[in-house]
Image (cartoon, helix red, strand yellow):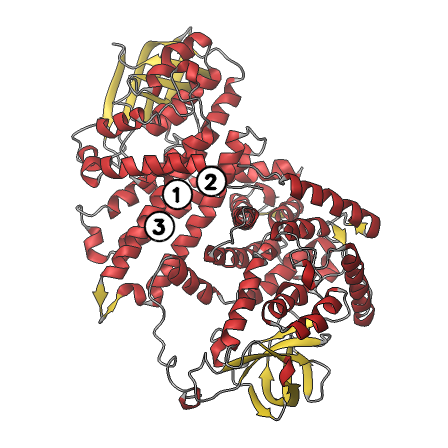
């Protein structure tokens, strides 16, 4: 048992670190952020430039085969790169969907022509991708997709509405799940397409989130023409293609849910006074710090177990579903405790109270979203119950009926 | 990175699991639960024969000379099998304390007999565990131990005790005429307790080093080992509930198909995964003598106590009325979770220790 890199990983880590030092600025505090003050266009331009730089150095798609423009490395090497890059100030939140889920799906299901056309340019940062799956009536029940694709000569004509599409407002392409057959049961009449986000009839509207941010969009598709050559996988095979995309998501390994909120809680508790004594000596505060550590560092440790499995050439199991359950809860309870440490002043937003309050406040207000996005707490629990513990699946009255007969 | 046990270590674990499944049956555990014995001599003998008791004791002193990682996996299986044996007192605490703090002579005198199970020791090393004033009044004057200590694990089965008193680590012969021992009814009768009273009893000091640091180090190691027992026990309780939920029908369905039941079981699973992750980290810190041990052991203890308590409570509940009978093992898990979670200090004590370690690291 150890936390050491294999010789191959250690050598790769040294290479990556040297390259990052030569090409980016190191991060010094957790408040440091790339591109503070840049407007969105400039930020996106910087993100594309950085992606191109990575691609030239071979780091754009480390685990992808060389024949697809990747480095041909291992998933563990990808993890090593991400760990090192996190120590530097570089643009983020732009290419995650492209590299993490959309392009691996194209690589897995695309025709040779599609792979030739899309992969290399996306790795170079020329194209940003998004993922158009969820709909107003197809969230947890993703098989309930009602966006309609109708064959018309060599084209498909697509009409419908997608929602919670991250990055759609700046994406160039998307992978789109649509219904091509209304007489088959719900999971069987779906087909995946590649859609040009700049095509006529694609209308993107940002969603104003509860956190006062705008990361997600509604996407309206009005008679959007997609050539049949842009179909991804066979007609009627969309459910399978989508599952493979979601499997890729699991490889992201929930590392978004680790963090050091407990260390921030210590800093804040050292400034605060509760009942006339330093908050840091209050038993409730200390228990809260301990529990936040147990949850957050626990997530980190579970992820390391998953990474060890990857390192051995195995894949992490569905038990990774517990990561999001534990981690998102830690954001909610730990974030709330941080705010409580400030008492009445804790209600003052970070821009007026001080930079050290920004992350805890952001975690608190974004935790409800984290508990929903990428599979709600309830879906995660079903996954654990059914796939790990072998309990019966939910009773489904709609699974075998033709989709058009289902009640809306 | 390989944050996992090796294949050899897993094979050892499998072997121990297989033996304990046959030996430490519910009937065997119940001989102790029902007060017919102070520990399961049969299980103890099998663990000794497997080399499990002396797994981390050096070969020169009659052990297998392997490390703490192997002992952690043995602990997990001992917890899973609800073993009614003095592993905590004799091996995790006493043998480890003698190994770390004893002279060559003391090691030669005691370790071989602890490794083969012929001598059973008890130990109380953490002054934070006993919290009632009546239960912790010990003093040493001129090498003589006097006073009372209560709730001593395996106090009747043991023939020697390792105690931490007045900054000193001492070994005491419990068979001496000036020691009075009274069995105490335990909330988990399969893990018995005793009250020990000393009246000028000869106490031999362990020779080596900073005794406070050794006592703390051994207690933290025991917290990690108990976390493995707790994870093993919690997993057993979870799968017992899962099996029952698949078998039991109500309202025309297996109760395991109800979402409230599924989600409860999933919550138990997640709590155990969290505890297991921290237990593994504790194992790593213990095996490598890492400076992170205080933090790792505290977190493992809290997460594993919470997980086993939750799993035991909910496993009994999911069994319904039948779960609330003496004949079912559900209450043994409930009792064992409580016992393991308090015998070396409650989660309140260890949560605070974890916070202290984190605050110290942040400074």
Q: Which residue is mark 2?
A: B279
| Residue A176 image-quadrant placement | bottom right
Q: CA distance from mark 1 to mark 3?
A: 10 Å
Q: Which residue is mark 3?
A: B311
Q: Which mark is residue B231?
A: 1
x 47%, y 16%: residue = B101
Q: Position of residue B203 (x, y in %)?
A: 38, 10
Q: Is residue B262 above or below residue A78?
A: below
**Chain identity of mark 3:** B
Residues flagged by tags 1 and 3 on a common chain: yes
Helix or strand or loop: what does disc 2 sit on?
helix
Which of marks 3 and 1 precedes in the sequence? 1
Q: In this rendering, would B209 be left or right of A226?
A: left
Helix or strand or loop: what does disc 3 sit on?
helix
Do residues under tags 1 and 3 come within 8 Å of each other at their CB atoms?
no
x 78%, y 68%: residue = A44
| Residue B31 image-quadrant placement | top left
């Amino acid at each position: 048992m150890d936390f050491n890199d294999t010789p191959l990983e250690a050598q790769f880590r040294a290479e990556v670190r040297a390259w990052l030092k030569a090409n980016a600025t190191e991060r010094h505090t957790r408040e440091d952020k790339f591109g503070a003050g840049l407007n969105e266009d400039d930020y996106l331009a910087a993100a594309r430039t950085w992606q191109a730089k990575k691609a030239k150095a071979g780091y754009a798609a480390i685990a992808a085969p060389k024949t697809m423009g990747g480095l041909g490395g291992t998933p563990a090497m990808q993890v090593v790169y991400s760990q090192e890059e996190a120590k530097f100030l570089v643009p983020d939140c732009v290419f995650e969907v492209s590299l993490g889920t959309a392009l691996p799906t194209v690589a897995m299901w695309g025709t040779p022509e599609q792979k030739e056309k899309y992969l290399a340019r996306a790795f170079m940062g020329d194209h940003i991708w998004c993922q158009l799956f969820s709909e107003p009536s197809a969230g947890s029940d993703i098989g309930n997709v009602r966006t309609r694709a109708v064959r018309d000569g060599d084209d498909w004509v697509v009409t419908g509405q997608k929602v919670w599409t991250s990055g759609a407002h700046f994406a160039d392409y998307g992978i789109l799940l649509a219904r091509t057959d209304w007489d088959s049961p719900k999971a069987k009449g779906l087909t995946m397409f590649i859609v040009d986000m700049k095509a006529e009839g694609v209308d993107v509207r940002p969603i104003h989130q509860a956190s006062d941010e705008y990361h997600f969009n509604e996407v309206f598709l009005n008679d959007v023409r997609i050539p049949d050559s842009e179909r991804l996988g066979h007609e009627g095979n969309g459910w399978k293609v989508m599952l493979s995309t979601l499997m890729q998501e699991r490889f992201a390994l929930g590392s978004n849910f680790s963090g050091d909120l407990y260390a921030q809680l210590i800093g804040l508790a050292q400034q605060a006074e509760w009942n006339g004594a330093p908050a840091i000596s209050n038993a409730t505060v200390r228990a809260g710090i301990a529990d936040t550590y147990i949850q957050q560092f626990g997530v980190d440790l579970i992820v390391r177990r998953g990474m060890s499995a990857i390192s051995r050439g195995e894949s992490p199991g569905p038990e990774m579903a517990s990561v999001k359950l534990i981690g998102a809860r830690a954001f909610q309870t730990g974030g709330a405790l941080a705010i409580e440490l400030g008492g009445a002043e804790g209600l003052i937003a970070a821009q007026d109270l001080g930079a050290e309050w920004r992350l805890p406040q952001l975690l608190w207000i974004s935790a409800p979203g984290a508990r929903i996005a990428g599979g709600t707490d309830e879906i995660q629990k079903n996954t654990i119950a059914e796939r790990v513990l072998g309990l019966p699946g939910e009773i489904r009255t709609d699974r075998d009926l033709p989709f058009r007969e289902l009640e809306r | 990175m390989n944050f996992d046990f090796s294949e050899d270590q897993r094979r050892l674990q499998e072997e121990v699991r297989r033996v304990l499944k046959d030996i430490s049956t519910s009937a065997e555990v119940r001989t102790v639960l029902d007060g017919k014995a102070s520990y399961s001599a049969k299980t103890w003998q099998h663990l000794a024969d497997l080399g499990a008791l002396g797994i981390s004791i050096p070969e020169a002193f009659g052990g297998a000379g392997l490390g703490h990682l192997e002992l952690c996996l043995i602990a997990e299986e001992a917890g899973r099998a609800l073993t009614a044996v003095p592993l905590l007192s004799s091996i995790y605490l006493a043998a480890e304390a003698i190994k770390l703090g004893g002279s060559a002579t003391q090691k030669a005198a005691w370790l071989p007999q602890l490794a083969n199970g012929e001598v059973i020791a008890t130990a109380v090393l953490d002054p934070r565990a006993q919290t009632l004033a009546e239960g912790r009044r010990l003093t040493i004057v001129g090498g003589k131990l006097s006073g009372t200590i209560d709730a001593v694990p395996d106090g009747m089965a043991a023939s020697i005790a390792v105690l931490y008193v007045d900054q000193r680590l001492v070994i005491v012969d419990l068979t001496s005429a000036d020691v009075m021992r009274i069995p105490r009814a335990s909330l988990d009768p399969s893990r018995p307790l005793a009250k020990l009273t000393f009246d000028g009893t000869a106490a031999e000091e362990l020779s080596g080093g900073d005794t406070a640091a050794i006592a703390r180090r051994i207690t933290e190691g025991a917290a990690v080992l108990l976390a493995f027992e707790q994870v093993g026990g919690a997993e057993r309780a979870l799968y017992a509930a899962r099996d029952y939920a698949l078998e039991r029908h109500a309202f025309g369905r297996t109760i395991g198909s109800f979402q409230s039941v599924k989600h409860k079981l999933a919550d138990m699973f997640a709590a155990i995964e969290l505890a297991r992750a921290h237990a593994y980290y504790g194992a790593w810190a213990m095996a490598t003598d890492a400076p992170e041990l205080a933090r790792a052991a505290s977190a493992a203890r809290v997460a594993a106590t919470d997980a086993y308590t939750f799993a035991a409570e909910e496993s009994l509940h999911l069994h319904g009325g039948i779960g609330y009978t003496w004949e079912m093992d559900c209450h043994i898990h409930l009792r064992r979770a409580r016992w393991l979670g308090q015998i070396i200090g409650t989660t309140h004590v260890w949560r605070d220790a974890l916070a202290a370690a984190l605050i110290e690291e942040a400074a």
